[in-house]
Amino acid sequence: VTVRLIPAPRGTGIVSAPVPKKLLNMAGIEDCYTSARGCTATLGNFAKATYAAIANTYSYLTPDLWKETTFTKSPYQEFTDYLAKNHTREAGQKQEVKVY
């Protein structure tokens, strides 16, 4: 038996058969669709597959579990003041001088 858990919009509740619904409620999942393949009449295997599907969801990193990133300045941002003070552009374009 394979069980697939599909995220549902808030307020939907758990849309599944009674066996997975009990396990998902115990796991604290509020909104979820489920899809099952195989012989779901054997409740022990169905419950075990549901438990395995719930266990596999903990391998995903959600944004609240991401590490805090520290951004460093690029060299252009870091040395902007130095470049602005020491390197100036000439006002006009250089024109070719013809020598006869």
Image: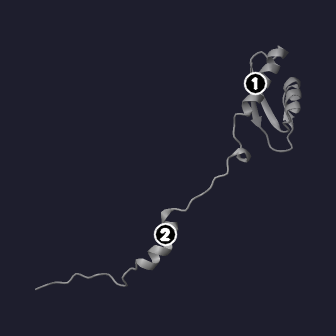
> Which amino acid type corresponds to the residue marked 2 in the rendered image?
Phe
Mark 1 or 2, nearer chain start: 1
Query: Does any portion of residue 93 appear in the rendered image?
Result: yes
Q: Is 9 placed above or below 14 here?
A: below
14 sits left or right of 56 in the view: right
Q: In the orientation shown, which residue stands out farthest toward the left?
A: 100
Of 51 and 10, nearer the camera is 51
> Which amino acid type corresponds to the residue marked 1 in the rendered image?
Ala
Task: Kindly state the secondary structure of the residue where label 1 is placed.
Answer: helix
Which quadrant: the C terminus?
bottom left
Tell how many labels.
2
The residue labelled by disc 1 is 52
94 sits left or right of 46 in the view: left
Identify the residue shown where x is 48% and y is 69%: 79
Query: Does any portion of residue 41 appear in the rendered image?
Result: no
The residue labelled by disc 2 is 79
Identify the residue shown where x is 22% and y is 81%: 96
Image quarter for residue 9? top right
**How has the structure been colored for display?**
one colour
Task: Kindly state the secondary structure of the residue where label 2 is placed.
Answer: loop
Of 9 and 75, nearer the camera is 75
Residue 94 on image: x %, y %:
28, 81
Residue 62 on image: x %, y %:
71, 43
Image quarter for residue 16? top right
